[in-house]
Image (spheres, grey):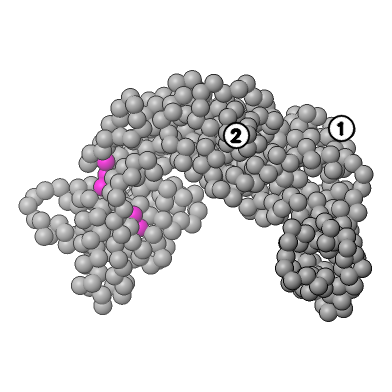
Amino acid sequence: MQIPTTTVTLTPDEETVRQLLVDVAAVIDSENNNGEEPLVLRFTGGWVRDKLLGIECHDIDVGINKMTGFNFATRLGQFLEENQEKYNIPARSIHKIESNPEKSKHLETATTKILGLDMDFVNLRSETYTEESRIPQMEFGTPVQDALRRDACVNALFFNIHTQKVEDFTKRGLEDMQLKVLRTPLAPYETFHDDPLRVLRLIRFSSRLGFQIVEEARKAMETEDIRRALRLKISRERVGVEVEKMLQGPRPFNALCTIYELKLFPAIFTPPIDNLPDLPQEDLIEACDLVARINISTSFLCNLVSNPQEKYIAWILAALTPWKDHMFPGTDTKKRIPAAATAARDGLKLPTKIVTTVTNSFRNYKLIQDTVNGEKLTRAQAGMFIRKLGADWKSQYLLAMLLETIPVWNRELGETEESKAILSKYEDVLKQWFEDMGLEEAFAFRPVLNGAELMGTLEQKKAGPWMMKALNALMEWQLENTEVGKEPADEATKENAKGWAREHKDKLLEL
């Protein structure tokens, strides 16, 4: 069969590894010289795609035609030990990774590290799916079968380490690289029905690479059958992993736009329950548009997304805005857990720390809106407010701003007069708290006096219910009368604080 091919240029380390693997394969063939098909190794998938795009990649998956990955890797380790002087590559331990279908590890693989390259070894395989599960039955397969089972033609390119040619067994991968499009090797409906996780993978690759998903695949993605399969057949942990990669990638806005356009919100950003409420899904795209503009803004609001983690959380909050003011009945209602937090916890299986931020943000957004729209706060009032919100106060502030702005935001036209006024108001308050008052890290300010020092000043032998309230009162005084923040106070400031505490002793002990 004639297949399209091309070439790539290897780095010196990649070439050394290639030659090493060729030599190991030759030794194995010589030990089994019975006229069988020779052992053929290929670098597969993402490394080939990234190599053709000029993207540095240190992870190489090695597909083997007639040997398990663990057996080959074990023989590789032995070969390195026997030929240490020739190759000058230290023999590394081989790690066997058992099959774990729920985490997309359908066959056992072996992994090791050579010259800084992370190597995974696995046999080429074919897949057979059942109606009920996305977990396939796996068998040894041909290069064609292995290529056709993959999620996209551009991810199905192989580099044959013996011929040193890139092989395109789908006959579309190299063309798609040129066209910058993503299409499935087999019919898209069949591909997504077999494994609905491929829907999310294509969206992720589209946003990461800047490639367009072909129309035929998009139409298959938005069919009710596929949306339902994505919701029911895929573990929520896997959904969460794909969403995390999208939102931490280079184009999270593109990924969320595609999810919105394909009407996939109910299959992704929801807990796994039936009878979902009718939600304003358009809020997602308006909120995401706002976050995208803030990310590239030169306004002071960009301080709300000043590091990768804050940017990531901003995209999560924006994606969950349709859940505003919803709570699920039962325990969630009793505990005042917002539905957005339930979606983050049960629908995406996000880490507890992020779920806590989502919970705080959707619980407190009205309080923050009232504060921003109210009278100007003193430094003590603003500092205590930030301390009440906690370390993730900037994310909470961002959500409050998004939810107030969404109703008057126009994605097509950008800022309206009303939205401009709202954003300007939030920017002014933020600037006051940051620059004029120096309160960005007020949540972490240390009291001028610790508990023991306050007890000694007030001549108390043990702490009581009064202690926490007295420390808060001391912090209010500190915020209004000193510049002390996270660093310990000097002795003069401590003496001033003790004098204030003695003067207000009766009041502090009554609190």
Query: Is residue 329 within the magenta segment?
Result: no
Q: Is residue 271 visible?
A: yes
Kindly report the distance in space between the C-alpha atoms of the residues bearing marks 1 and 2.
35 Å
Picture quadrant of residue 288: top right
> Range of the magenta residues?
119-125
Q: Is residue 321 above or below residue 375?
A: above
**Residue 418 got which mark?**
1
Q: Nearer the viewer, residue 487 or 470?
A: 470
User: In the figure, is residue 435 to the left or right of 140?
Assistant: right
In percent of the image, x 86 and y 48: which residue is there?
Answer: 429
Q: Secondary structure at mark 2?
A: helix
Most prominent secondary structure in the magenta stretch?
strand
Picture quadrant of residue 156: top left
Residue 136 picture location, percent across and down: 30, 34
Q: Residues within 10 Å of mark 1 (few under 14, many from 20)?
A: few
Q: Nearer the viewer, residue 6 or 69?
A: 69
User: In the figure, is residue 129 to the left or right of 182?
Assistant: left
Residue 394 picture location, percent across and down: 73, 50
In percent of the image, x 86 and y 53: which residue is there?
Answer: 381
Kind of residue sitting beneath label 1: Glu
Kind of residue sitting beneath label 2: Asp
User: In the figure, is residue 508 to the left or right of 201?
Assistant: right
Q: Residues within 10 Å of mark 2 (few under 14, many from 20)?
A: some
Q: Is residue 121 above or below residue 292?
A: below
Q: Which residue is mark 2?
A: 332
Residue 486 picture location, percent across and down: 75, 67
Query: Is residue 123 within the magenta segment?
Result: yes
User: In the figure, is residue 344 to the left or right of 117?
Assistant: right
In percent of the image, x 67 and y 34: which residue is there?
Answer: 321
Q: Nearer the viewer, residue 496 or 198?
A: 496
Count of marks, rendered view: 2
In percent of the image, x 25 and y 59: which residue is there?
Answer: 73
